[in-house]
Image: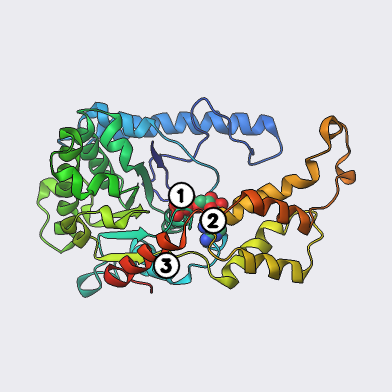
Amino acid sequence: RMAISGANGSSNSAVRRKPPPGKRRETPPSSDEESWEQHSSEDEDQEAQDIVEIMNKLPKGVDPQSARQILNDIVVRGDEVHWEDIAGLEPAKKALKEAVVYPFLRPDLFSGLREPARGMLLFGPPGTGKTMLARAVATESKSTFFSVSASSLTSKWHGESEKLVRALFGLAKALAPSIIFVDEIDSLLSARSSGSEHEASRRSKTEFLVQWSDLQRAAAGREQSARDKKEGDASRVLVLAATNMPWDIDEAARRRFVRRQYIPLPEHQVREQQLRTLLSHQHHELSAEDIQVLVHVTEGFSGSDITALAKDAAMGPLRNLGEALLHTPMDQIRPIKFQDFESSLYSIRPSVSSDGLRKYEDWAKEFGERG
Ligand code: ADP
């Protein structure tokens, strides 16, 4: 699935946030439904206009159909993410601010020796907040955000994937500053796809690496030719990638990621912070001691496991109501209790085994930074 969500207020932000085509956003920004409708259609008009404008000054070598495909598949998944929405991960936030956000906001300060890296890899167990971090970076750096899952580049558009990769980078340059976020990067850059693997995925891998090298060359301060300049600012495009399987990335591709940031499972105080945040707007009866017990028993849970647990426990008061659910007034629904969490713990288990975890720790020790 490919998404570009627009950036956010900067003058060259070409595409604005909007509800996905055919889908309504769940929470309108105002309680006034009518003004939202109006707002939404104005936004869409503006967006259509923006797309026409981009298509008119499409960089050379970019296939218009592929560009359109990228621009049209605009999906905004939920609301903006900010740093404070993400529990813990302070070293990763710090690294991302220094490597991406500040350089994008103050390009004048970050040149020469301070030239930022063109690529950063976020790796770690699934559900630990890698996607959230990427979305927060997009929000905070006021850049155009292209979000693409690597498997869609290699499988979905047979034969077209090379053109799509080229269009992706072409548009990113044209709309710079931009971030290209590639989820499941392992499926694009795996060692296997260089062998006898499917021709299409091998070609999109090669194209991706070629395009990315061009960015790195531009960033290294080489003179951009006049033609390049006209095609956008390559020095303000960054590839941010995430993977749950860092060991699948082939060695040459791995070395291109100058920065490799480990996103570990949440530690004690991070799990506590997350549980408190999840419970903060809920009607519940958990004491401070109850929360300590939960923090203790959720050792080994990822952020998404903890979210799943809290969501399941929150259903507790509604279960067993049966049909009565339909007419019980809100204030007569009982609070969430510790026992709800206890029962949910039977079904919601950590998604990473301790063996699996060791594999991440080993890879991090050998190739990663913990910050
Ligand atoms: P990943 O990309 O690492 O697989 P995501 O960023 O998609 O994981 O996280 C999945 C879900 O888990 C999030 O939508 C959020 O509900 C929860 N989550 C994971 N990590 C955190 C965190 N550090 N703080 C708050 N919520 C988290």
Q: Secondary structure at mark 3?
A: helix
Residue for point 23% across, 52% down: 233
Return the residue at label 1: 9
Q: Secondary structure at mark 2?
A: loop
| 355 to the left or right of 151 | right
Name above or below for residue 280 compared with residue 114.
above
Observer-nearest of 147 and 247: 247
| Circle 3: residue type | Ala
* Ligand 1 lies under 8 Å from the Cβ of mark 3: no
Q: Quadrant of the N terminus?
A: top left
Label 2 or label 3, whichever comes before in sequence order: 3
| 143 to the left or right of 37 | left
Graded by Cα atoms within 10 Å as few (under 14), some (14 to 19) or many (20 or more), the crowding at tag 3 reads: many
Graded by Cα atoms within 10 Å as few (under 14), some (14 to 19) or many (20 or more), the crowding at tag 1 reads: few
Graded by Cα atoms within 10 Å as few (under 14), some (14 to 19) or many (20 or more), the crowding at tag 2 reads: some
Residue 281 at x, y percent in the picture: 74, 55
Tell me the number on the disc at residue 135.
Answer: none
| Circle 1: residue type | Gly
Tag count in the figure?
A: 3
Return the residue at label 2: 350
Tell me the number on the disc at residue 92.
Answer: 3
Residue 112 at x, y percent in the picture: 20, 72
Name above or below for residue 284 compared with residue 162.
below
